Image: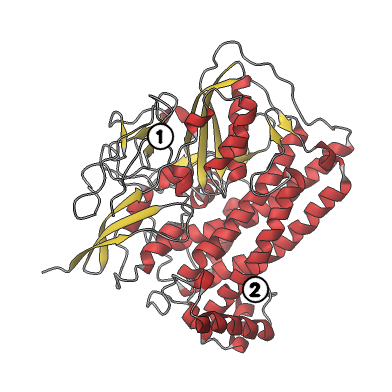
Amino acid sequence: MADKKHVVVDPITRIEGHLRIEVDVKNGKIENSWSTGTLWRGIEPILKDRDIRDAGLLVQRICGVCTWAHYEANTMSAEIALGIRPPTNARLIRNMINATQFMHDHVVHFYALHSLDWADVAGALKADPKKANELAHQFSKTPYNASVEHYTAVIEKLKKFVASGQLGPFSGAYMGNELYKLPPEGSLIVISHYLDALYVQVTLAQMMAIYGAKNPHPQSLVVGGITSVMDMLDARRVGQYASKLEEVGNFVQHAYLADIDLIAHFYKDEFKEGWGCGSYNFLSYGGFPETNDWEAEYRYLPQGIIFNRDVSKVEKVDEKFITESVAHSWYKGPKEGVYPGKEETIPEYTGFKDDGTVDGEGKYSWVKAPRYKGNMMEVGPLSRMLVGYASNHNNIREIIDNFLKKHNANINQMFSTVGRTAARALETAYIWYGAHKWMNDLITNIKQGDERTWTRFEYPEKETNTSVALYEAPRGSLAHFVRIKGKKVTHYQVIVPSTWNASPRDEKGQRGAYEESLINLPVPNTEEPLEILRTIHSFDPCMACAVHLMDVDNNKLKKFKLEA
């Protein structure tokens, strides 16, 4: 008789928000899976009848991480609705701030939230600092903070954590699990950079504050442009940005990218097509506008869709084909997908089964199921890099080919957990180069005498049609749908990256990207499901973004009892 076990991982830790994963494990491999968003929150109803000029500051509160992403997407949607475009200086500074958001998010995600899925704390304690130094030089000519003395100090710090019984940031790691494949010295290198990243993220936060006033929740963005005029004209500010950008680049090039090469080398048996990547379709809206026309197709991050893992062609994105299904979500409404500009969000919580597990045939998540032309899509850095590769956008193909060549790999191997993790690091370097470009363009534009930072606009007397900002946040494709009348917001809807990736099944029974990515993965130890965590974490889940609630009947919040 086949060995079959139902495994519940609740909550999935080291992510933003609340996520529950259930799987059926048969003969040591995952046979079926369900992804459940277990917490709801609301922002869209708060925006109704609010002044459009205030909306950006409010939507930042959708997420505690990608605050700028929602701020700018909201502002862009309003500008599209009002028929205006910001001046060149505003666009460039927005891109510079957004670049720091991307780099900050990717560095923090890998080290704070994902690195312990690859590196074993128990292994690091056994490492030889001299051998670690030698190993580090195999993956970088000038490895970051790689002296024997430094590695020795890191080991001593780890020993103190363990001896105290309070592992702090290292708690929850499955130390000694057989799925860890780095040698002890490799684990020491990655964990050493984990500690270094704590300082790098401070530098990145400071970079955002140079033009954004603060981090998180920057303040310098307004409909029509920016408010940081004096900072833009102060040469010392751009000097500070440039200096900190070089500090970050040193870490990205000699720590982050080197660690990804280390992982790809030692996890090469998992660096293969389909290992942790069940999606066959990849979506990118495109990010970082390169002109002042938000609706122009050309952006620094590419726009397009890949179907069936076919990187020989890219289809253009048409937002009219986006729908959301609630067939398996805790909301009322038609099972068939509805266009976000027309949909309502009415809660209908039905809970779990009597045994505490999900009702796989019914509703089981607060996350909806977005689809494009009825297809499940994956979004995020892997999607963007694949679309860039397929469309030969800028030098993305060269960046990916250089990475693959180092590991004697082909493009199909990017369809994997290792590939998804690598794509995020490669994108970080790509964004770093972009930040230099926008900074230099800003200097050139100001020297030419252009000091404009804002475009004047008039409020519409009649309600506008639904306007959509298609935007790329660090975690993937983000869309804000808005209608405006006078100064007020009359309709608002958001589809965030984790709604795409974390979605439950739709009316056709298609699994979401998380669910599909887990099928056939090995789980040799169901008490320590490391492979589940590693794969789900590679998406960088943000459940706080993905779950929203709107009560269309009244302003009172309903009461729900959460079953154990």
Does residue 66 lie above or below 171 as drawn?
above
Label 2 Cα neighbours within 10 Å, binned few <14 / some 14-19 / many ≥20? some
Q: Residue placed farthest to the top in the image?
A: 461
Q: Nearer the viewer, residue 426 or 460?
A: 460
Residue 343, image x, y percentages: 39, 26
Label 1 Cα neighbours within 10 Å, binned few <14 / some 14-19 / many ≥20? few
Q: Splitting the image into 4 quarters, where does residue 32 fall?
A: bottom left
Q: Earlier in the sequence, mark 1 or mark 2?
A: 2
Q: In the image, 559: left or right of 217?
A: left
Residue 490, image x, y percentages: 51, 21
Residue type, label 2? Ser
Residue identified by numbered label 1: 557
Q: Is residue 221 visible?
A: yes
Q: Splitting the image into 4 quarters, where does residue 54 fall?
A: top right
Q: Is residue 286 visible?
A: no
Which numbered marker is on residue 140? 2
Residue at disc 2, secondary structure: loop
Q: Nearer the viewer, residue 276 or 99?
A: 99
Q: Nearer the viewer, residue 423 or 56?
A: 56
- Quadrant where the image shows the C terminus: bottom left
Residue type, label 1? Leu
Separation of marks 1 and 2 at Cα, in angstroms:
54 Å
